[in-house]
Amino acid sequence: MLNISGIQEGFVLDHIKAGMSMRIYNDLGLADRDCTVAMIMNARSNKMGRKDMLKVECPIDAIDLDVLGFIDHNITVNVIKDNQICEKRKLRLPKRIKNVIRCKNPRCISSIEQELDQIFLLTDEENEVYRCKYCEEQYKRGDHKR
């Protein structure tokens, strides 16, 4: 039996697709924060078959939930205070994402001006399509590579 101690204050990311927790750890910048992280990979799940989980001991406002919603809006976010789940947050596809993906159009101003933020806007929620704010290059979720 795997036993990982509870957390006083922080959050648990549950229902992460198996194999995705390391990417989420990196995309959320958790390595750069002063917080304790427990990563559970390939755990059995009745709902998903296999899943990953992240237990993070630091305040929830320290992370960008839009980045998490972009990666996978089906992840469950449980907010922990005093060793108890005090809130469950639903993720959604963010309307706007900044510096998560890069525009692949070599003529885009964001490709030429390196210090310019990479901003994408959700243009088709049903098909999960984003477009570059500057050149309208299409980005379809699912082929996410940083």
Image: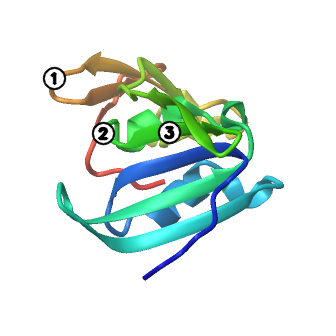
SS at badge 2 = loop
Figure label count: 3
Q: Position of residue 85 (x, y in %)?
A: 54, 38
As drawn, the residue found furthest toward the bottom would be 1
87 or 40: nearer the viewer: 87
In the image, is 113 to the left or to the right of 4? right
Up-down relation of residue 130 to residue 67 (above or below): above
SS at badge 3 = strand
Amino acid carrying label 1: it is Glu
Does the rendering let one see residue 105? no
SS at badge 1 = loop
Dot label at residue 43: none
Residue on which disc 2 sits? 74
Mark-to-mark CA distance, 1 and 3: 26 Å
Amino acid carrying label 3: it is Asn
* The N terminus sits in image quarter: bottom left
Q: Are marks 1 and 3 in contact (CB under 8 Å)?
A: no
Q: Position of residue 106 (x, y in %)?
A: 45, 43
Residue on which disc 3 sits? 78
Does the rendering let one see residue 126? yes
Up-down relation of residue 91 to residue 68 (above or below): above
Amino acid carrying label 2: it is Asn
Mark-to-mark CA distance, 2 and 1: 14 Å
Residue on which disc 1 sits? 126
Number of the front mark, 2 or 3: 3
Up-down relation of residue 122 to residue 40 (above or below): above
Residue at 59%, 40% (x, y): give it: 84
Residue at 63%, 66% (x, y): give it: 5
Crowd around label 1: few <14 · some 14–19 · many ≥20 (10 Å): few
Crowd around label 3: few <14 · some 14–19 · many ≥20 (10 Å): many
